[in-house]
Image (cartoon, rainbow, N blue to C red):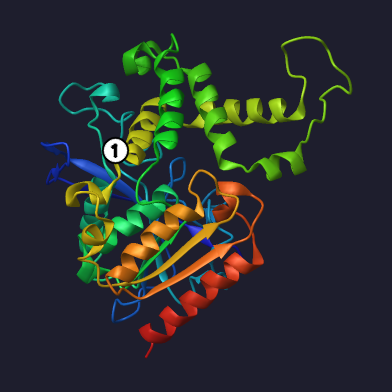
Amino acid sequence: MSLQANPVRHRFDDPLPLTSGGRFGPYELVYETYGTLNAARSNAVLICHALNASHHVAGITAGTADDHGWWSNMVGPGKPVDTDRFFVIGVNNLGSCFGSTGPMSLDPATGRPYGPDFPVITVEDWVHSQARLADALGIERFAAVMGGSLGGMQALAWSYLYPARVAHCVAIATAPKLSAQNIAFNEVARRAIVTDPDFHAGRFYDFNTVPARGLQVARMIGHITYLSDDAMASKFGRMLKHGDYGFSFDVEFEIESYLRYQGEKFSRYFDANTYLLFTRALDYFDPARATGGDLSKALAPAKCAYLIASFTTDWRFSPARSHEIVRALLANRNPVTYAEIDAPHGHDAFLLDDERYHGLVRSYFDRIHAVVNA
């Protein structure tokens, strides 16, 4: 029987203080839970999502036939993060377009969608909002906080912002800050969106339109960075769509067809203003900025154990970035397990099936379970 998920909406009337200054609220967060919280409330695991994901981490949403969660291969009964053992929580981040308050939501002050008036949100803001939800659920300490990519940044932030509330931090395919190249990719994607004539300075809702062309190009750019050269070569190579050159600027190669398909699909379900907010949150994450560039000092408050994992062909969040995290943690004498997995898929590897990767996570959560039930 498939794991069933039921989204829950929680309203917060007390405004959330933001890194940018000021406060935002009231607001709502949508979340899902899987498994059962034990009597000691010690088996809770928080899963933090990446850029285009949501609270729907695992299983099938109630009332649908095939809406599988984005990490269903990782989370569920008998999976590496076993919901027969752990109480797993997936939260949709503030600013998203999948249920939590975001740019598409109505601003109570105007009765119109927030649009570009929605405040710029940081990774730290998300973590503080998640801590409020944990309070509402009566969870004082997580057995683990886990995420990949942008989700891994949130897991790291949890470890030093709330050191007493995290036993284990599991950060996969992530980085302590973006490189200039990564910020550049994000900026090109954002420019594609904001220069789309249908963007209307972020108020496209008022015009009953969507900056679809900008979103498509943004997704195409992003998707290229999520795949390795080897993965693209293996899947597409130089295969032609119609068997021979057409001497045109329409789709000629299979890789072009694939990217256009991904872009068009993305533009039908993702909000342009959310894309701008989330990529800027990626850009801003830099815990060492407050400590003169010293990552060890930034992570010094953390008291938890860590699992850090990277993938050899991930050139967007390369193993070298994970090495920076590991070195900083070792300098602080934190317990660290590190794995560098030889996988051909690029950054997307953290979402895919890989026996060694899943075996690593399963083994680590077996150890957590043993302690929780000691």
Of 118 and 32, the residue lying toward us: 118
Pick the quarter of the image with the N terminus: bottom right
User: Is residue 65 at least partly visible in the picture?
Assistant: no
Of 51 and 265, the residue lying toward us: 51
Tally of marks: 1
User: Residue 276, how many percent across, how many down?
Assistant: 36, 29
User: Residue 351, how many percent across, how many down?
Assistant: 56, 53
Of 254 and 330, the residue lying toward us: 330
Picture layout, residue 369 above or below residue 116: below
Secondary structure at numbered mark 1:
loop
Q: Which residue is mark 1?
A: 101
User: Residue 130, how many percent across, how many down?
Assistant: 27, 54
Which residue occupies 36% across, 64% down? Answer: 327
Residue type at tag 1: Thr
Of 240 and 228, the residue lying toward us: 228
Task: Give the class, few, some or many, for how many residues have Cα within 10 Å of label 1's Cα (few <14, many ≥20).
Answer: many
Q: Is residue 133 left or right of residue 89?
A: left
Picture layout, residue 221 above or below residue 65: above
**Outermost right residue:** 243
User: Is residue 91 at least partly visible in the picture?
Assistant: yes
Choose top left, top right, bottom left or bottom right for residue 112.
top left
User: Residue 95, how many percent across, how many down?
Assistant: 31, 37
Choose top left, top right, bottom left or bottom right for residue 122.
top left
Pick the quarter of the image with the C terminus: bottom left
